[in-house]
Image (cartoon, helix red, strand yellow):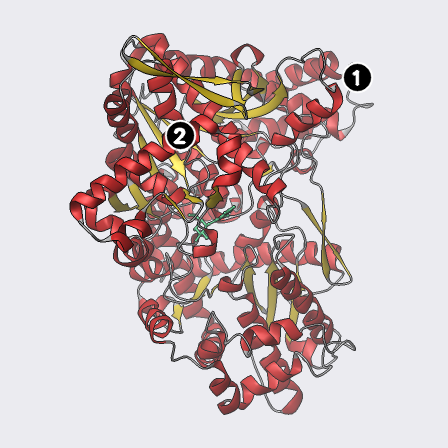
Amino acid sequence: MFSNKERFKKGYLKKLESLCGKGIEESTIRDQYHTLGNMVREYISTKWIETNELYRSENKKQVYYLSIEFLLGRLLGQNLLNLEIKEVVEEGLHDLGISLSEIEECESDPALGNGGLGRLAACFIDSLATLNLPGHGYGIRYKHGLFDQKIVDGYQVELPEQWLRHGNVWEVRKPEEAIKVFFWGRVETSYDNNALSFKHVGAQKVLAVPYDMPVIGYQVDTVNTLRLWNAEPSSLGPNQDTLSYKREIEAITDYLYPDDTHDEGKILRLKQQYFLVSSSIQSIIASFKKENQNLRELHHSVAIHINDTHPAMAVPELMRILMDIEGLTWDEAWEVTTNTLSYTNHTILSEALEKWPIYLFQPLLPRIYMIIEEINERFCAELWDHYPGEWERIEHMAIIAHGLVKMAHLAIVGSNSINGVAKIHSDILKNREMKSFYDIYPWKFNNKTNGITHRRWLLKANPELTSLITEVIGDEWKRQPEKLLDLKRHIYHPELKERFAAVKRKRKEILAKEIADKNGIIVDIDSIFDVQVKRLHAYKRQLLNVLHIMYLYNRIKEDANYSIQPRTFIFGAKASPTYYYAKKVIKLIHSLADKVNNDPRVSQVIKVIFMGNYRVSLAEDIFPAADVSEQISTASKEASGTGNMKFMMNGALTVGTLDGANIEIMEEVGRENIFTFGLTAGEVQRYEENGRYRSMEYYHHDLRIRQVVDQLTNGFFSEDEGEFESIADSLLVQNDQYFLLRDFASYIDVQERVGNAYQNRDKWLEQALINISHSGYFSSDRTIQQYADEIWKIGPVGIRI
Ligand code: NBY
């Protein structure tokens, strides 16, 4: 079907006719998309079945990656690329008068995630399949993914996202594999045959129906599975209010991250987490039992990974199944559970570490809560042996304390591996945040520096750069991204530099057109494209970027002779709907943009652009066009970052703090090829411990700071002087928790160096190329190989390249 253009065209027309009942002339773009998607899915179905059969017959160890988020992005283009049929399809469609890129545009982004954690999960399943590793993703099929962001008068407004409105060609519903998940009710304990037995009675039973999506490896025959669970009513009792019951059940998979400020929302999130965990583990066990009898050996065949704490109930759920259903003793079940599970931590921000009130947890999940209590008691007894009499330490480490269940502690105690996502982050976990656990379980702790799939973030997003690299060093780097290093021998060739410059320029033109279309603003292609795109959060310090731009504005206004390299500052960010500060920063960026872009003189040299509704598909247009990558989190707060890697891979230079993976990027490219500034993690930690930081002193002593902070509240931006008062307060009244004013001077300096460096065009191009050459280390193929070797202990199955 895809072996040559003519066969493809014939097949396509036939499929269009049978699926949509239309000829090409009457077909809509959606019909055309639908037809192609179906053809691709059918094309891979044999490989998908064969992969599953191979896994069964070889009976090798498999990994299941449990994650509350999978931020996939559009699939059509990536699938065509991984299957190496993009050219045939593109040319065939072209003959039929259809543009492939237009078809791709009509696919909605499956936005089943909100940021780094969910995107990492998506990169990981791509790498697993490409490395022929038997590994699958398990998640939730949210009806509405992350909200669509609209900007109204500079304010973020959230609209429900509707990715399933026109169906999803990639999924296969498997009702015959549906599973029941139990909520509420109570546990009856009885004593039969000399053993306690537990029965969960009066439960509300929810049906978890799997929807499987193929995960297609690049240039290989492996097609793994992403299994997303949908909540449906199981059976309706005679007296139930059918409609409200149905709604209550379906609400479990309606939205990603329901608002959890109130108890009702907290219960819903707990339901989602247990729904994911219970259905996944039941289905994993069922599939294990098809080929194996002895559940005491589960961990020889199965590894289950807990992505952050959201699926941490995997610990008690696996215990429950092994004991209550499979009849293992506590000790046997504990041995299997801890040897099966591993856990990744993605943050040290204490407010992001999940803790659930017992009064919500226990009634919703009575048997699970019982098991957690028992795990906690045994763990505390173990601690007592280690630290006799040290009540305080034990209370601090307990899984249940002060009326709360601490999910991170549960995950640590119940897993054989705990990893951070960049060297510095893993060190902070060991030496500070989780030190007490590291002291008793040092062997569990390790680092796995994040990575990104270069197949999406370079091959798919930047075909122009991909072709250029391939022309220079051949195409082995596509399967072995570390070979990008071969590029380094060529970076002084003037021709390569010029051709890279041309690629960058072309990508800037494409983005500029998008900005003109969406924002109605014309930007200067010769200006530096300086980009900060990521979730909006105080620690990520979009506000520091804003304060710098305000400073530049003031300089330009005050000094007629002030000359700088023109810059276009580009932002993209969604704020959590209930995060007041973050939403204010979005408004501030818009107010600043109005001020800057409408000033006749200032707008000659700088512009400020906020690109609305930042998401994977938009990111694919932004990274290739960037000159400068803003990675300016307060040192120690960004666990790793992955955007930083996507920028360097596309030849942008980083302006960054010594935080997260920025440090490893610096180690790779050399200090001279990255712009670092600001406090180190150690310095931040010392301030946090000694409490000696006074933001007010910086406000009083640095006129530049005083001017910009005053402008937040003196009517400079807004008639309403109170509009940005809360932001000014965060800096002064609340003593600037994230050290923006402390790092301000250093940031201004480094930005000036960036501006000057850009003027040495030749050197800049060399530096950009050095960044690309060293980006191979940050491929998620490297990361996944490390997880496979060191944590999951799995190897490839049936390599048939
Ligand atoms: O995970 C991010 C980290 O901030 C980033 O540094 C890292 O590179 C990335 C991948 O390891 N964390 C992240 O995205 N976390 C969340 O999105 C998140 C979502 C929900 C909750 C907590 C964190 N929650 O508590 O509901």
**Local crowd at mark 1 within 10 Å, few (<14), some, or many (≥20)?**
some
**Three-letter code for the amino acid on which mark 2 is drawn:** Met
Name the image quarter holding residue 766. Answer: bottom left
The residue depicted at 60 percent of the width and 56 percent of the height is: 573
Is the residue indicated by label 2 positioned so its CB lies within 8 Å of ligand 1?
no
Q: Is residue 762 left or right of residue 409?
A: right
Q: What whole-number distance in Å separates the C-alpha atoms at marks 1 and 2?
A: 59 Å
Q: Position of residue 15 (x, y in %)?
A: 68, 15
Q: Nearer the viewer, residue 765 or 631?
A: 631
In the rendered picture of this protein, how many numbered marks are placed on residues? 2
The residue at which mark 2 appears reads as: 370
Question: Which quarter shows the N terminus?
Answer: top right
Q: Relative to the observer, which residue lies in front, 47 or 763?
A: 47
The image quarter in which residue 555 lies: bottom right
Would residue 65 be seen by someone viewing this image from the given angle? no
Q: Disc 1, disc 2: CB below 8 Å?
A: no
Q: Is residue 294 left or right of residue 702?
A: left
What residue type is disc 1 on?
Answer: Lys
| 319 w.r.t. 120: above or below | above
Residue beneath label 1, please? 22
What is the x, y in percent for residue 575? Answer: 62, 55
